[in-house]
Image: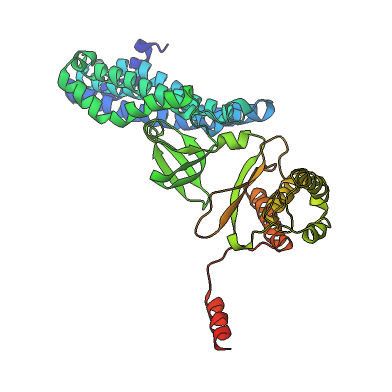
Amino acid sequence: MIDSIQFIDYVNFIKDALVNNGVSDYWANLINVIVVVSIIALVTYFFDRILRRIIIKAFKVFSVKTTTTFDDFLVKSKFSRYIAHIIPLIFLKEIIPSILKDFPFLYKGFDDVISIYAIILFVKIVRSFLRSTQRYLRTKERYKDKPLESYIQVVMIFLWGLAIIFIVYQLTGRDILSFATLGAASAVILLIFKDTILGFVASIQVSVNDIVRIGDWIVYTKFGADGTVTDINLASVRVQNWDNTFTTIPTYSLISDSFQNWRGMEESGGRRIKRAVLIKQSSIKFLTKEEIEDLKKIDLVTEYLESKYNEITAYNNKIGTDKSVLINGRNLTNFGVFRQYLDTYLEQNSSVSKEMFSMVRQLAPTSQGIPLEIYCFSSNKQWAKYEGIMADIFDHVIAAIPYFDLEVFEEPTGKDLQSFVKQIKK
């Protein structure tokens, strides 16, 4: 603590000199205070700058030598800079009363300013510490996808609320809670902080119910979002779309509207492939014995055709069906054999997940043909790899169709119409 009596003796030399030169005691005292306060302000300013450099430098050296990265984040969030302001603030808090004791109004003003600055400095120190904690936890695998910023914002809102209460009390001497009981004040608070309150409730539900995590791929058509969640806070969720644009979604919309989260796919054993080709209905037919023998040359259906042909032949002989007409009895079709071929092809494809469901199915006929759908899961879930696997599968499917005397349906093009007209003219 500073000895106020000795300090006053030191700082009153200007007052004594002015009084000795005939200046009134009041004006001599006022001029003395102005000069002394100005000198102290300059000394405090330079002392603060020097101390700040020393503490920041020492903190950086300390953070480099330690193995933990937490102190590195403290340096980045200016924690040491805020800490350096504490000692000059204490110095002013101790020395100002002894200087301004004869000027209560000035003393009250300086005391209020210093106290308010101390409150704000405390909030900034806590905020810096919380931000450092958030960034440090982001380096931990366990907390990478957690909405830490939402929690920090809740703490900061509460802390700023307390700071406002203390500041009002410092300025007026009245507790702000006495005003908060008024209905009008409550209505204003609810109106101003409506989005914050909704966001706060939504953040809790998002976190507790694990609806969205940082790093999730979500599709939110209403807001045009299709990409990865990069940030979750009280007010909004930030999504980086695949075209590298950003979309901001109100946090409370995540619990009030419907959206698609692809996390389940990313955590599963594969990514779904569900696509169909349209087969021309007129190209589907029964297979003759000769055609079956030709198809046996295709390795993936050889075993199937041999067993199935023997089974069908035995059945037809048993019931004595007349096979001079192909439709009689049981028969194989080129479409059915092709489906079996694709089933075997998917089973042997190393890019298709064997732990997940797989099938080739025929959908309801349409005016454009019969959809033949492949439903399976690629073992690689990375987008580019997934698209490559799906393209390879359907390249093979389309190329294999003619081997079974099937045709893919296509809308007629200008070239098709020209060829048709030429044939008519001939």
Query: Residue at 41% across / 36% down in the picture?
Result: 258
Instruction: Say left or right for 198 vs 220.
Output: left
Q: Which quadrant of the figure has residue 22?
A: top left
Along the line of sight, which residue is nearer the eye, 368 or 50? 368
- Vertical placement of residue 347 versus 19, above or below: below
Tell me if I can see residue 21 in this picture. no
Along the line of sight, which residue is nearer the eye, 164 or 295? 295
Instruction: Say left or right for 227 vs 397.
Output: left
Measured as percent of width and height from the top left, residue 161 is found at 32, 21
Q: Which quadrant of the figure has residue 355?
A: top right
Q: How many marks?
A: 0
Measured as percent of width and height from the top left, residue 358 is found at 67, 40
Measured as percent of width and height from the top left, residue 83 is found at 48, 24
Along the line of sight, which residue is nearer the eye, 143 or 108? 143
Query: Residue at 65% across / 51% down in the picture?
Result: 390
Query: Residue at 59% across / 60% down in the picture?
Result: 281
- Vertical placement of residue 95 versus 315, above or below: above
Query: Residue at 55% across / 88% down in the picture?
Result: 425
Measured as percent of width and height from the top left, residue 246 is found at 46, 47
Tell me if I can see residue 320 in this picture. yes
